[in-house]
Amino acid sequence: VQLQASGGGLVQAGGSLRLSCAASGRTFSSVAMGWFRQAPGKEREFVASISYSGGFTIYADSVKDRFAISRDNAKNTVALKMNSLEPEDTAVYYCAAAGMGTSWVIRDPLRYDYWGQGTQVTVSS
């Protein structure tokens, strides 16, 4: 089972990026998916989560109204569109898949069983 995140890069403040995460080895259409991030010297923090069907989403307060999580179960992918990026958004971003039975949105990283390798997002001021 593998989650492969991509789409990170260097962008100026106010810019946009779209992160993608492709899952392989099994289907994740029955579980929640999420994005987390970790900045240098800080703990990993929750960014966004999407329910198994894609019908419900939740966000960290710091990214609400700027980021949008989506999923395509037919392609076994999840995406994070990031708008109005700020230097404080600089971090390594990780996609994650929840464990079996966790179909609804969830903020707790301990409920996610599979993690991607991370993709670096750097926002310059």
Image: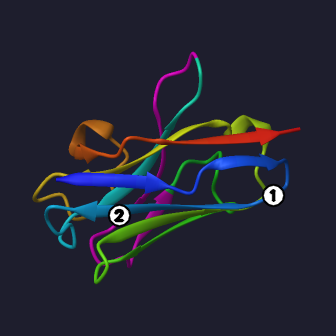
- Compared across the picture, whether 57 is left or right of 84 comes to left
- Compared across the picture, whether 58 is left or right of 62 comes to left
Residue 93 coordinates in the image, percent (x, y): 51, 43
Q: Residue at x 17, y 71 (%)?
A: 30
Give the Cα separation between the discs numbered 1 and 2: 24 Å
Mark before the other along the chain sequence, 1 or 2: 1
> Closest to the observer: 102 or 9?
9
Q: Residue at x 76, y 42 (%)?
A: 123
Magenta span has 56? yes
Q: Secondary structure at mark 2?
A: strand
Residue matched to label 2 = 22
Of tags 1 and 2, the one toward the viewer is 2
Q: Which mark is residue 15?
A: 1
| Residue type for callout 2 | Ala
The number of numbered badges drawn on the structure is 2
Q: Residue furthest right?
A: 125
Q: Which residues are magenta?
A: 41-58
